[in-house]
Image: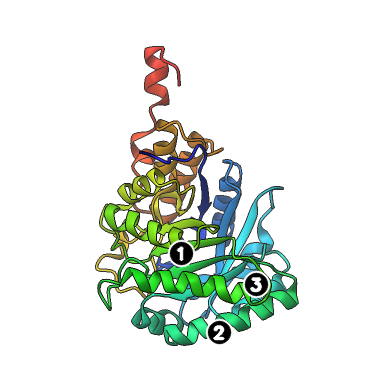
């Protein structure tokens, strides 16, 4: 029996996930145009850029200028990413970032060392300080993300119970401060997940935290991204990170092919949902144009399918069928 949701929320990550893995630093004005175009599609949450070390991720060196240049659309959140307290303070200082109380956890110690230069246990302990920092800034906890929750290129398969324990840990450190943890994202950072694993992990986390909304941050590295989304939809998951044109990938994840490391593709998933009768609030044709804009900017063929094949709207119209 399906618990398929009636409406799904997509959080767009293309501008941050996409540009961080590219070797080229693209013109600021062109990146701004892409973000502003995405905001006109019906998306309500766009992750614009990250506040991380310019030495290690030079593509994100101008994040403050990036946020300042965007003409914001009312009703759209323009989010940023940080991996330490200094990054949060930089994001806060811009005055242009819609701050969210994010808790960052790692299911892989090896990946934590490469991505954050600390152990997974150290990162977990730091989150208590992050919550105190958020409280001082008037920022409520918004979500926890558990990275490498499905598998790791450095450590291999990840025990599901480890992910459940991390989700419960995030919940508990919020509860200790009298706060609720609204959402937990399970991140398949390196594209290890499959549909059966996706169902199992969602079920285990849901059993442990029945009142917490589950979201997924999936990568389509090995072509199972859409299948994993479908498996999650059948279990009632209604919250997904995604990336226009399938952009993205972590520079520190040791991908065999960085060009294949992208997130699940926003416009392809919107198409999937619409074909299944699930609402998204997103204008698919406008989103496809954004994907094509991203492809022109990047300068090579990107991985999205609908952006190249088109939706079925024109074919249905040609046949006189309802859209």
Colouring rule applied to residues: rainbow
Neighbour tally class for label 1: few under 14, some 14-19, many 20 plus, Cα within 10 Å? some
Between 244 and 11, the one nearer to me in the picture: 11
Neighbour tally class for label 2: few under 14, some 14-19, many 20 plus, Cα within 10 Å? some
Q: CA distance from mark 2 to mark 3?
A: 18 Å
- Label 1: which residue? 208
**x and y percent of residue 230 in the render?**
35, 45
Query: Which quadrant of the view contains residue 198?
Result: bottom left
Sequence-wise, the earlier of marks 2 and 1 is 2
Sequence-wise, the earlier of marks 3 and 1 is 3
- Left or right of 194, for residue 168: right
Query: Which quadrant of the view contains residue 91?
Result: bottom right
- Quarter of the image for the N terminus: give it: top left
Between 287 and 123, the one nearer to me in the picture: 123
Instruction: Tell me if residue 281 comes above or below residue 266 in the rendering.
Output: above
- Label 2: which residue? 126
- Which residue does the image show at 41% across and 64% down from the upper left? 187
Q: Circles 3 and 1: CB distance less than 8 Å? A: no
In this rendering, the label closer to the viewer, 3 or 1: 1
Whether residue 85 is visible to the viewer of this picture, yes or no, is no
Q: CA distance from mark 2 to mark 1?
A: 23 Å
- Left or right of 23, for residue 214: right
Does dot 1 land on a helix, a strand or a loop? helix
Sequence-wise, the earlier of marks 2 and 3 is 3
- Left or right of 226, for residue 323: right
- Label 3: which residue? 91
Whether residue 221 is visible to the viewer of this picture, yes or no, is yes
**x and y percent of residue 141 in the render?**
63, 68
Instruction: Tell me if residue 279 comes above or below residue 85 in the rendering.
Output: above
């Amino acid at each position: 029996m399906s618990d398929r949701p009636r409406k799904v929320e997509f959080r767009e990550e293309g501008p941050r996930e996409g540009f961080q893995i590219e070797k080229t630093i693209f013109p600021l004005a062109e990146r701004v145009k892409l973000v502003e175009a995405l905001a006109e599609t019906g998306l309500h949450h766009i992750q614009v850029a990250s506040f991380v070390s310019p030495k290690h991720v030079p593509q994100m060196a101008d994040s403050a200028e990036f946020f300042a240049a965007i003409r914001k659309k009312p009703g759209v959140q323009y989010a940023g990413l940080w991996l330490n307290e200094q990054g949060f303070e930089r994001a806060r200082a811009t005055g242009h970032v819609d701050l969210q109380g994010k808790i960052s956890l790692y299911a892989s110690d090896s990946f934590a060392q490469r991505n954050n230069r600390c152990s997974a246990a150290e990162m977990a302990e730091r989150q208590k300080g992050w919550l105190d920092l958020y409280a001082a800034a008037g920022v409520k906890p918004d979500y926890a993300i558990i990275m490498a929750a499905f598998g790791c290129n450095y450590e291999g398969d990840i025990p599901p119970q480890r992910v459940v324990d991390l989700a419960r840990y995030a919940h508990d450190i919020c509860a200790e401060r009298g706060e609720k943890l609204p959402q937990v994202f399970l991140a398949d950072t390196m594209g290890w997940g499959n549909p059966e694993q996706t169902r199992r992990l969602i079920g285990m986390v849901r059993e442990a935290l029945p009142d917490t909304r589950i979201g997924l941050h999936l990568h389509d590295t090995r072509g199972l991204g859409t299948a994993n989304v479908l498996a999650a939809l059948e279990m009632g998951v209604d919250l997904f990170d995604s990336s226009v044109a399938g952009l993205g990938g972590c520079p520190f994840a040791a991908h065999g092919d960085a060009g294949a490391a992208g997130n699940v593709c926003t416009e392809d998933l919107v198409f999937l949902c619409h074909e299944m009768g699930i609402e998204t609030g997103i204008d698919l044709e406008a989103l496809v144009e954004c994907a094509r804009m991203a492809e022109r900017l990047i300068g090579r063929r990107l991985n999205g399918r609908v952006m190249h094949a088109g939706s079925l709207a024109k074919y249905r119209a040609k046949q006189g069928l309802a859209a």
